[in-house]
Image (tube, rainbow, N blue to C red):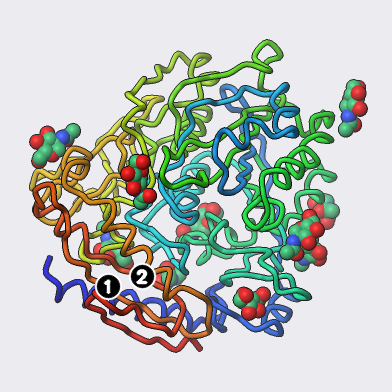
C-alpha cells in the first residue's frame, strides 16, 4: 500500500473512534470521552454501573479454574532472588524459560488474550476492532465463566485511560494493564463489559464461592511493581496468595499463573519469571523447575488444551501448552533455539504501521489439542485468509522472534526481519511516540514516517517496516527528522 492509503486508513480509525463516542442507550459505550472522563462523569457512571456475576462449572481436563496474575517490568534474576517470590516458589513450578513478547506493556496484555500484538509498540489509548477475537470468544463456546479483577478500577467496565489516586494523583489503575477493556467486542456488549471488575469484587466472589473459571488479576501501579520495585510486587504477591493457599474453595482444581508482562532491561532477552501454583499442581511438582520454552501465548494454548477449545488462528495455535497439562494430555511440547530470542521490540504491524493491514488469522490451522479455528473467526476472516494465501503470504511461527505479520507484497518473517530490520530505527520511532505521549481530553494521532536506515541490505521489507504510526493522546506533535501528519480529534 502507498502512503496515501495509510492516511485514509488513519482517517478511518479516527472516524470510528468519533462514531463510538456518540452512543445510544442500547450501546454500553459511554457518552463522555472514554479517553479522559472527568471525575464527576466517573462518579455518575459508577453510581449506575452493574457488576457482572458469572459463575459456571465446566470441567477441564486438568484444571477447573485458571487464575492469571501479572506483575510489571522485572528481569528474571531480580524476581528469582526476591524473598517473597522464593517463599511462593516452594509451592510452585518455576518456569525458567518463559518469555514476554515485546515492549512496552500494552502490546503484551493485548497479545496474551488474542494471540498477536499487531505491531503495537506503545502504551497509548488503543481500541481493538470487533472483528479481532480473544479468549472470551473461545470460553463462550462452552459457557466457561470469566472475569477480570483490576485494582482500583472505579467501577466495573470503566473504559478511561487511567484512574489515579484522587488525593495524590499518583498512578493507580491504568487501562494499558487491562487486557480485555481494549476489545470492542467486549466493551460493546453489555453482558461482557460488566465482568471487568474492581479488584474488591474478587473478595465478594471468593466469599460467595462464585469465582469465575478464567480470571485475570492486575494489581495497581504500586502493587504490581510498575512504580515501585520487585520487593513491593513480591510482597503484594505473597500477601495476596498466602491466605488463598489455605482456602480449599479457591484451591480446588485451580491453576494459578503468577508472572510479569515484560522484563526491565530492554537490551537483554525478554525472559520473565513465572510460577504455576494452586491446587492443580501436584505436591510432587511443587518446588520444581520447568525449562520448556513458553511465552504469553502459552496462556491461550493451555486454556484451549484444558477445555478442548478451538483456536484464534494466531500465536495461540503453536504455542507450547504448560507441560504439567501437556504431559497429562499427551500433547507434545516443542524445543526451540532460545539463543535467538530477544523479543525486545515490536515487529511491524497494523498498530505501528497503518499501511499494514490486520493480519488474517490462520483459519486452516489445527491447535495443540487438535481443534480447528473458532467458527466466527473463520466466518469473518476466511475469505481474506484465502486471498492472502493466494498471494503466497507466509506466516512466521509463534516461536519466532516476531509476531505474525503480513505486509503488501513482501513476506515479513524472522528470516527477513532478523537480517534487514534495524532495531535502532524502531527505538528512534518509539522515542518520538513517547515524546508526544501523555493524557488529555484531546486525542492527537500522529503518523511519523521514518526513513529506512537499515545498513544490512535495506530490503523492501525494511522500508515498509520503518513507517510507524503512533496513536497518542497529546497535543505536542512529533517533530524533527520525521515527516509528520497530525490529525486532531476533539473527544466530546
Ligand atoms: C474499587 O476498589 C477500591 C479498592 O481497591 C475501593 O476503595 C473502591 O471502593 C472500589 N470501588 C467500587 C466502585 O467498588
Ligand atoms: C489521569 O491521569 C492524569 C495525569 O496524571 C490526571 O491528571 C487525571 O486526573 C487522571 N484521571 C483520573 C480519572 O484519575
Ligand atoms: C495501590 O493499592 C494499595 C492497596 O492495595 C494502596 O496502599 C496504594 O496506595 C495504592 N496506590 C495508589 C497510587 O493509590
Ligand atoms: C456495537 O454493537 C452494535 C450492535 O451490535 C453495532 O451496531 C456497533 O457497530 C458496534 N460498535 C462497535 C464499535 O463495534
Ligand atoms: C455478547 O456477549 C455474550 C456473552 O459473552 C455473547 O453470547 C454474545 O454473542 C455477545 N454478543 C455479540 C453481539 O457479540
Ligand atoms: C452473593 O450472591 C448472591 C446471590 O447471587 C447475591 O445476591 C449477592 O449480592 C452476592 N454477594 C456478594 C458479596 O457478591
Ligand atoms: C496455612 O495452613 C498452615 C498449616 O495448617 C499454617 O501453618 C499456616 O499458618 C496457614 N497460613 C495462613 C496464611 O493461614
Ligand atoms: C534488543 O536486544 C539486542 C541484543 O541485546 C540489542 O542489540 C538491541 O539494541 C535491543 N533492541 C532494543 C530496541 O532495545
Ligand atoms: C477488520 O476491522 C478493521 C478495522 O475496522 C478493518 O480495517 C478490516 O478490513 C476488517 N477486516 C475484516 C476481515 O473484517
Ligand atoms: C522467510 O522469507 C524468505 C523470503 O521470502 C523465505 O525465503 C523464507 O523461506 C521464509 N522463511 C520462513 C520460515 O517462512
Q: Residues within 10 Å of mark 2 (few under 14, many from 20)?
A: many
Q: For ligand 9, which image quadrant applies?
A: bottom left
N-term-proximal mark, 1 vs 2: 2
Percent across and percent down for residue 149 are 68, 52
Q: Are marks 1 and 2 in contact (CB under 8 Å)?
A: yes
Residue occupying image coordinates x 42% and y 40%: 268
Q: CA distance from mark 1 to mark 2?
A: 8 Å
Residue 57 in sight: yes
Q: Residue furthest top?
A: 284
From what the image shows, is residue 369 above or below residue 104? above
Q: Residues within 10 Å of mark 1 (few under 14, many from 20)?
A: many
Query: Circle 1 sits on which residue?
Result: 448
Closest to the observer: 31 or 376?
Answer: 31
From what the image shows, is residue 431 above or below residue 83? below
Closest to the observer: 380 or 231?
Answer: 231
Residue occupying image coordinates x 47% and y 63%: 123
Closest to the observer: 155 or 228?
Answer: 228
Percent across and percent down for residue 465 are 20, 57
Percent across and percent down for residue 224 are 66, 50
Query: Circle 2 sits on which residue?
Result: 432
The disc at residue 84 is: none
Residue occupying image coordinates x 53% and y 74%: 27
From what the image shows, is residue 436 above or below residue 92? below
**Label 1's element?**
strand
**Label 2's element?**
helix
- Which quadrant holds the N terminus? bottom left
Percent across and percent down for residue 167 are 78, 75
Amino acid at each position: 500500500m502507498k502512503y496515501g492509503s495509510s492516511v485514509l486508513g488513519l482517517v478511518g480509525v479516527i472516524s470510528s473512534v468519533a462514531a463510538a463516542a456518540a452512543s445510544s442507550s442500547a450501546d454500553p459505550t459511554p457518552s463522555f470521552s472514554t479517553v479522559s472522563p472527568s471525575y464527576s462523569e466517573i462518579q455518575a457512571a459508577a453510581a449506575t454501573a452493574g457488576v457482572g456475576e458469572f459463575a459456571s462449572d465446566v470441567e477441564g481436563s486438568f484444571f477447573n479454574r485458571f487464575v492469571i496474575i501479572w506483575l510489571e517490568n522485572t528481569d528474571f534474576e531480580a524476581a528469582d532472588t526476591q524473598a517473597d517470590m522464593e517463599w511462593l516458589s516452594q509451592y510452585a513450578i518455576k518456569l525458567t524459560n518463559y518469555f514476554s513478547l515485546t515492549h512496552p506493556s500494552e502490546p503484551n496484555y493485548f497479545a496474551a488474550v488474542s494471540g498477536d500484538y499487531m505491531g503495537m509498540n506503545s502504551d497509548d489509548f488503543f481500541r481493538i476492532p470487533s472483528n479481532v477475537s480473544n479468549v472470551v470468544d473461545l470460553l463462550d463456546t462452552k459457557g466457561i465463566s470469566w472475569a477480570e479483577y483490576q485494582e482500583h478500577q472505579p467501577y466495573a467496565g470503566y473504559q478511561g485511560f487511567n484512574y489515579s489516586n484522587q488525593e495524590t494523583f499518583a498512578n493507580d489503575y491504568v487501562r494499558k494493564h487491562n487486557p480485555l477493556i481494549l476489545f470492542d467486542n467486549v466493551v460493546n456488549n453489555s453482558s461482557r463489559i460488566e465482568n471487568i471488575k474492581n479488584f474488591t469484587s474478587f473478595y465478594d466472589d471468593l466469599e460467595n464461592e462464585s469465582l469465575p473459571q478464567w480470571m485475570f488479576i492486575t494489581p495497581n501501579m504500586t502493587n504490581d511493581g510498575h512504580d515501585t520495585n520487585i520487593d513491593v510486587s513480591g510482597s503484594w504477591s505473597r500477601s495476596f496468595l498466602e491466605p488463598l493457599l489455605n482456602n480449599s474453595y479457591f484451591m480446588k482444581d485451580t491453576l494459578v499463573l503468577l508472572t510479569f508482562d515484560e522484563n526491565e532491561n530492554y537490551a537483554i532477552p525478554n525472559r520473565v519469571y513465572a510460577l504455576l501454583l494452586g491446587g492443580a499442581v501436584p505436591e510432587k511438582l511443587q518446588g520444581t523447575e520447568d525449562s520448556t520454552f513458553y511465552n504469553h501465548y502459552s496462556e491461550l494454548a493451555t486454556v484451549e488444551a484444558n477445555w478442548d477449545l478451538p483456536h484464534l488462528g494466531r500465536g495461540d495455535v503453536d504455542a507450547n501448552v504448560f507441560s504439567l497439562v501437556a504431559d497429562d494430555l499427551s500433547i507434545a511440547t516443542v524445543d526451540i533455539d532460545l539463543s535467538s530470542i530477544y523479543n525486545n521490540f515490536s515487529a511491524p504491524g497494523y498498530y505501528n504501521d497503518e499501511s499494514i493491514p490486520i493480519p488474517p488469522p490462520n483459519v486452516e490451522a489445527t491447535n495443540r489439542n487438535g481443534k480447528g479455528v473458532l467458527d466466527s473467526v473463520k466466518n469473518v476472516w476466511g475469505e481474506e485468509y484465502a486471498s492472502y494465501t493466494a498471494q503466497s503470504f507466509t506466516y512466521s511461527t509463534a516461536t519466532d522472534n516476531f509476531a505474525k505479520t503480513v505486509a503488501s507484497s513482501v513476506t515479513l518473517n524472522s528470516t527477513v526481519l532478523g537480517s534487514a530490520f534495524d532495531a535502532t530505527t524502531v527505538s528512534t520511532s518509539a522515542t518520538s511516540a513517547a515524546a508526544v505521549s501523555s493524557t488529555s481530553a484531546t486525542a492527537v494521532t500522529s503518523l511519523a514516517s521514518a526513513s529506512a536506515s537499515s545498513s544490512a541490505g535495506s530490503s523492501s521489507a525494511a522500508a515498509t517496516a520503518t513507517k510507524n504510526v503512533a496513536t497518542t493522546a497529546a497535543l505536542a506533535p512529533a517533530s524533527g527528522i520525521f515527516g509528520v501528519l497530525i490529525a486532531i480529534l476533539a473527544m466530546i
